Image (cartoon, rainbow, N blue to C red):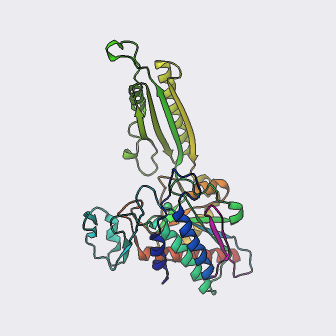
Amino acid sequence: MENLVGRFIKYAKINTLSDENSKTCPSTKGQLELVNILAQELKDIGMSEIDLDKHGYLMATLPANIKDTVPTIGFIAHLDTSPDITAKNVEPRIIEQYFGKNIILNKKTNIVLSPKEFLDLNNYIGQSIITTDGNTLLGADDKAGIAEIITAVEYLIKHPEIKHGKIRVAFNPDEEIGRGTDKFDIKKFNVDFAYTVDGGPLGELEYENFNAARAKITIKGLNVHPGSAKNKMKNSMLVAMELNSMLPGHQSPAHTEGYEGFYHLTDISGSVDSTTVNYIIRDHDKSKFNRKKDLLIRIIDHLNLKYGPRTIKITMVDQYYNMREIIELRYDIVNLAIKAMNAAGVAPKIVPIRGGTDGAKLSYMGLPCPNIFAGGHNFHSKYEYVPIKSMEKAVEVIVKIAELNAAQSEK
Ligand SMILES: [Zn+2]
């Protein structure tokens, strides 16, 4: 465990912000810098079959130390941090034995991490937590996950008395820009099942995420001089507003939580002549998801009848699906994680993800892959922080998963 915090801080200081506009994989050089360090580290601690490909996907093996045939488990974390917020000169700060008061992250810019605003902080009074200096994100999403996985396999190597099957680890680039699994070779990874260590606070365990689609809608208008426009002008922006008003207003991100889905207007730009509107559509329930997509199509059909054929065009593509359908067939994997958390003294908190994960895509590629906590809070923000004890517990959970998996199969 002594290397856990040092590892995390070392990784956090490397700028691995991913870039949507980049055509390369990985999208940024910083990710290659980090992954090269990780490859060396895996070698140093005694991992085998270390394989770093040209796209920045790193895989390695911890061989089994028992003869029985035990299913192979994979543990996965991502290298990049969110492009939403700068990761230049990340300076993690350790607050020893948090007192329960405001933490002044940055005096100059008056950035304060307050337990009044972030109530979860109160759960960590007396613990040491790692914060930012108020200028950047921290990158516990997902460098805490990386540090935890490496520390866990190192622990297993140093404690051969703990019996385990074959363990594989993988670190991939560009999760935050939705490309984390694009070049993930699951054949090469060759595991029976896996966990992404990319969840939030202590105990989080996730195997449900949104079904997701995005829709690009273009509206063609007709512009004439407003003084002589009667019965002639077609203002595409007004058509866009009409379209949006026909969607159920309460089904928007600001009015939904838990299992409630939504339409989210992500951007709109237009003139009288032409307007482009983008939506994302989300729902955990497949049939509700399909109904949401249908409704959008029917609204557009209706408006095309009203304003003339081909006034509105839509291209809608599915982005990812709820992994629950896949994981339900392999609920033993969820149970194993629950047992491991209980054994580590961590209360499992099963929550539906209001987003997607690499694990969802991997699950549909044939590799069932729930998500377990890495321990951090306030991801993608200057207020990001991670309690050290939560990171230690994540290491323990990974070790316990390996141990219990072997014990289960021996029976
Ligand atoms: Zn993440």
Residue 266 seen:
yes
When the figure is inspected, residue 109 is found, relative to residue 355, above or below; the finding is below
Q: Nearer the viewer, residue 37 or 381?
A: 37
Horizontally, is 276 left or right of 150 in the view? Answer: left
Q: Is residue 321 magenta?
A: no
Q: Quadrant of residue 224?
A: top left
Horizontally, is 314 left or right of 329 in the view? Answer: left
Q: Position of residue 344 (x, y in %)?
A: 50, 77
What is the tally of numbered marks visible in this picture?
0
Residue range (magenta): 46-66
> Looking at the image, which residue is at 61% across and 75% down?
402
When the figure is inspected, residue 74 is found, relative to residue 249, above or below; the finding is below
- Which residue reaches farthest front? 29
Q: Nearer the viewer, residue 242 or 13?
A: 13
> Looking at the image, which residue is at 49% across and 68% down?
143
When the figure is inspected, residue 86 is found, relative to residue 223, above or below; the finding is below
The quarter in which the C terminus is drawn is bottom right
Residue 79 seen:
no
Q: Position of residue 233 (x, y in %)?
A: 39, 17
Q: Is residue 47 magenta?
A: yes
Q: Nearer the viewer, residue 153 or 89?
A: 89
Q: Position of residue 269 (x, y in %)?
A: 41, 35
When the figure is inspected, residue 80 is found, relative to residue 65, above or below; the finding is above
Q: Position of residue 296 (x, y in %)?
A: 50, 33
Q: Quadrant of residue 181?
A: bottom right
